[in-house]
Image (cartoon, grey):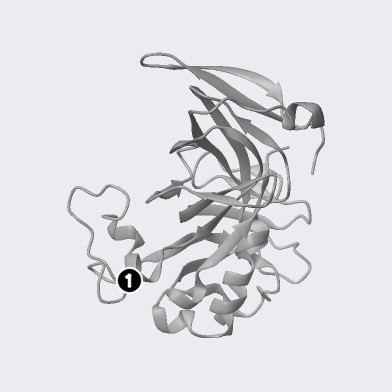
Amino acid sequence: MNSKKYIKTGLILVAAITAFTFSSCKKDKDETPVPAGNGTLLFHLHTNVDTSEVEDYGDLHVMTNNRKIIVNKAQLYISNIQLIKLDGSTYSVPGKIMLKKMEEEEYMIGSVPAGNYRSVKFDVGLSSSTNVSVPASGDSTLNQPAMWFGATAQPAGFVFVDFEGTVDTTTAANGSIAQMQSFTYRIGTNANLRTVTLPNQNYTVSPNQAQFVHMTIDYNKIFTGIPLNVSSNLNMSTTADNAGWLGTQLSDNISSMFSYEE
């Protein structure tokens, strides 16, 4: 945790949010009673590969180990969002599901009780009941054919994480651009739902104000424990594929992808 982390807040007026910044890590502020009421919580999420931010699909990135990567798709579902209070109890945000896309960074989570909190937790993926649901045509979050395993959402269900591109697969990470190989990781199925709990970093939701929680998603972490020089490890596209060791390993890597923005 970076003790110098700053979190932006904004004062909600009638129809707009005006942002300002304050430090969230001072102990005396965290222990100050907060008036009753509700504030608004938002997530601000960056898409990274290692320390390099993905701003456009198709760009070449060189990671700190000199491995080259080009990202063609990076998106995932977040659900079951919970705010962890200072005493360890939680507040569950009702019914919120978000599809995090590379090109979008700010997401309205909703109205939450004002108070002092120490962390957030959430699922990457969808609940078992949502995973077998048929999205309404007007549901812009779930009615996303690119996030289905089949031509329709059912019976195969939803893709929880879709990460695709080309990567240097040489053991020494010294291959040329021409040698880079395509990879497709479409993670899903109930068995591969994962919960992410961020480290403690206190923040305050104040009445009638907007509180941002700033995070980074490092998709490079998804390669942990995956020998990229084995061609069969570069593609996981079906629910059957998800049932193997690759599906388990990729899913187990999800929690390490999330961190607070530096």
Note whether residue 201 is visible. Answer: yes
State the residue at coordinates (49%, 46%).
57
**Where's residue 163, x and y in %?**
50, 60
State the residue at coordinates (33%, 65%).
130
**Where's residue 116, x and y in %?**
65, 35
When the figure is inspected, residue 233 is found, relative to residue 174, above or below; the finding is below
Locate residue 177: give its quadrant.
Answer: bottom right
**Where's residue 61, x and y in %?**
64, 47
When the figure is inspected, residue 191 is found, relative to residue 214, above or below; the finding is below
Question: Which residue carries the number 1 mark?
Answer: 157
When the figure is inspected, residue 63 is found, relative to residue 202, above or below; the finding is below
State the residue at coordinates (47%, 56%).
80
Quadrant occupied by the C terminus: top right
Front-most of residues 74 and 105: 105
Q: Is residue 187 left or right of residue 85?
A: left
What amino acid is labelled 1 in the image? Gly
Note whether residue 177 is visible. Answer: no
